[in-house]
Amino acid sequence: MRIPLSYSLRNLWTRRLTTVLTAGGMALVVFVYAAVLMLDEGLKKTLVDTGEFDNVVVIRKGSGTEVQSGVERNQAALVESQPQVALGAGGVAMSSKESVVLISLPKRGTDKPSNVVIRGIGPMGLALRPQVRLVQGRMFRPGSAEVITGRSIAERFDGGGVGETLRFGGRDWTVVGVFDAGRTGFDSEIWGDVDLMMASFRRVAYSSVIVRLARSGEFEALRDAFESDPRIKLELKRETQYYADQSEALSRFLRILGVTLSVIFSIGAIIGAMITMYAAVANRTGEIGTLRAIGFRKSAVLMAFLAEALFLSLLGGVAGLVMASFMQLYTISTMNWQSFSELAFSFRLTPAIIVQSLVFSLIMGLIGGFLPAARAARMNITEALRSA
């Protein structure tokens, strides 16, 4: 014979104050756990969505990032001439030879500087990124000291807005447009003409070449062509994979930090739940004895008290997730440890994070409630009724 679940729920309602306090402690732990997962997911989403699956990033072997890379002009021409590269209007290769440089700019309202990516792009640079659209002003004119800035740059850095001026590379650059890249990594970049950028920074080699595959399945053929040609000492990655790799170091740090904090805080929450459930057992000794006397088995008593602990933890888990969901309203910025540039991204709550957080809260409830529930189940019927 089983004890109805309504029994466990009524007991939680009867002890409203302790229920709220214990569930609140668990809610804070779940909030921290979910927030770190959301931060990690937001970082990955921002960087992975930065790339297009059919775009290929070509950089120097062993460089790892565009900032550290160098692609000679003759190598860039060989890359563009490969048959796997898509052709646009007029038979022009769908490719963009690009120069990537890090500079330091002060943030609005403070004198605190931060590293920002300056990207020189070719004529096809914008066409290769369909997620990027101008939302203010116009496109820069090739060969002119004009730039367009990502939405995050325009909002957070001095001189980043339309009509303002930025100084880098030994000259002043006029911001003529602001683009929105759909909350991807490009929102934290400044774009200008690649040839003028290279001249300003005294560069003789490109940082990378971005090409569009003629057909999605030709990536392996293009890679084989690179490996068989001794003149092309370059490596290539799909753009989505390239940006996913950029998030690896920071993502690993966030996961380690999140697990560490969650474990530490969860110990306190589990102890709190255990104390609450032990108190419930102590206050209901006579009630437990009555349940056993009228025929309920030890296992039924055990399950009833475990159900209380699980309901308690589920309540805390739901409350923690509700609090964490509001973090999606905020955008934060930090340094990308791969490129050493600032990256702005948002918290992101997904169904997988909801499930993981609720399972985490239930595990806390199970651990915290098992020993008190086992104590209740082991009570001697006669002694329990005598102490009522």
Image (spheres, grey):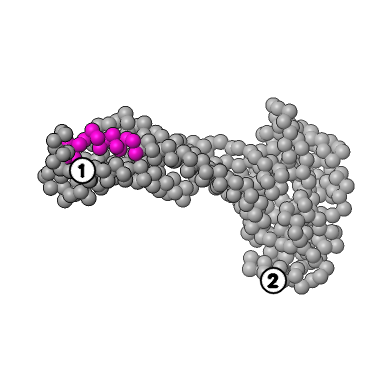
Write down the residue under mark 2.
221
Of residues 336 and 96, which is closer to you in this image? 336
Determine which residue is flagged by label 1: 379
What amino acid does circle 2 point to?
A: Ala
In the image, 212 versus 362, the foreground residue is 362
Q: What is the number of the mark on residue 85?
A: none
> What x and y, as percent, mark residue 242?
67, 56
Q: Of tags 2 and 1, which is closer to the observer?
A: 1
Q: Which residues are magenta?
A: 274-289
Q: Is residue 88 above or below residue 347?
A: below
Q: Is residue 287 magenta?
A: yes
Residue 382 lies within the magenta run? no
Q: Is residue 90 visible?
A: no
Q: Is 273 left, or right, of 159 in this rendering?
A: left
Q: Main secondary structure of the magenta part?
A: helix
The kind of residue on which mark 1 rests is: Met
In the image, residue 145 sits, relative to residue 90, either above or below, namely above
Residue 143: percent from the left, percent from the top? 85, 46
